[in-house]
Image (tube, rainbow, N blue to C red):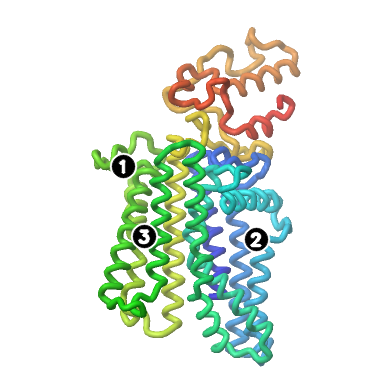
Amino acid sequence: PIFRTGFMMSVLLWLAGLTVYIFEMYRINYVILFDINPTINIGAGSLFLLAQIQTTIVTIIFLAYISDFKFGLLFNDEFGFEVYPLAQAVLTAALWLLPVNVLPWVNDARKHLGACFLAVCFACMPQCKVTFASNLLGDVLTSFTKPMQDVIYTGCYLTCAAISQGINVKTISAECQAVKGSVMTMLILDLPFFFRLLQCIRRYHDSKDRSHLCNSGKYCFSLLVSLVTFVDWTKRGWSEISMLALVLSVSSVASLYAMLWDLNMDWGLMPGFPSCHSFRRQRQMYPKLVYRAFAAFNVVARMTWVTGLMPNSWLYKDPVHAEKMVLALSVVEVLRRACWAILRVEHEQLANASHYRDILWVPDLKLDRACPAMGAVGDLHAPKGLQPQATRSPTPGLGDPLLPKSKPRRKHLQRRATLADLSGASYPGLLETSSLLQDSSGIKLASQSVATAMYPDTA
């Protein structure tokens, strides 16, 4: 469990890089959707490089641990059982938490991620607004219950190793396994679901949209599943068949609820449900096969809880195989969450499904590595069928009567025209007040930071 924590962080970074790579490939503007400062030059390549660093840390320390355990290269006593896990935990925590600029963008990204995390934890406070980024982060945290168990186990292991005079691995492992099964651990693992529940209630309080109450029911069922599976009902007079029926029924309802919500609300693949059973939506940015494959994998991955109801002899024969099973289930769940995020962000860009934005249209993503301030900001092309009206020459200064020959004045007019395009002024019919705007007093940009970063002298 100790080395599995660092490995799962590596998997998270690799999948995050793959997700951003897909966003870049299909021009999904995650920078605007997540309200990321455009000056933070973060992309798929940056995340892959950070994933390589995390993977290198875990691999080197784990191989050194195995080699020392087998051949006694460095430590011939049990001191190595404490040193290697401690080194892996310290280096991983330093990479994620300490204000060390391993890469040029890491510090700024860490601050942005920390602000999102605080928004998730304190969604009930008036100062914290529920954003799309904090919403997505809260959902990602709900998929990390098993890695969080490993974090608790690692803390217990290192604490016991530090306070005990002689290190007995079997004794410490037994004590830490008991800690993993305690009430306090269950409450810690339920925190992500509780935070998402608070976010849904906060969203309903702010918007009065009852769909957020329906979404909160999904997390209520998840908390109920956690409670039902934690309690030993046989000690309370229940038979094993009755206990199995209770766990099976509650878990089935929770899984069915979550799967339907993913397909209908988060991905928009079942418009008009339950009256209409069509498995498609009008606007799609990925190939059709992707939606069906991800939907099928989502159903299978959400049913992995069934393995907990099977007899242990069916799945593994010793504790080592049990830990391998936990690792496999953890990877499957994180992979499912990555697939979910790929479709969730795409649906948010196309339909503004959660109404986090004041306008429907989001500019397509366009990376410009030559200008870091414009990295991953987005180009100025409108959706199909909403092309801008040609009111001047596309090449300024070449016979264009609307632009003067003075170079500073020409640049100023170019910037004003670009901002007008961003605000939708050149797209007749794009911004309909009745359906796309929540604030009729004026048009808000999709992200105010985009214009500020691109044109600081107009701020």
Q: Label 3 sits on what residue type? A: Arg
Q: Position of residue 413 (x, y in %)?
A: 67, 17
In the image, is residue 456 above or below residue 136? above
Q: Which mark is residue 302?
A: 3
Q: Position of residue 316 (x, y in %)?
A: 37, 80
For residue 67, what is the image quadrant? bottom right
> Closer to the camera, 189 or 288?
189
Q: Position of residue 262 (x, y in %)?
A: 38, 49
Q: Which mark is residue 96?
A: 2
Circle 2 packing at 10 Å, graded few (<14), some (14-19), many (20+), is some
Distance of mark 3 from mark 2, alpha carbons? 28 Å
For residue 274, what is the image quadrant? top left
Q: Closer to the N terminus: mark 2 or mark 1?
A: 2
Q: Is residue 403 left or right of residue 380?
A: right
Q: Closer to the N terminus: mark 3 or mark 2?
A: 2
Task: Label 1: state its secondary structure.
Answer: loop
Q: In the image, what residue occupies the spot 60% across and 90% down?
A: 168
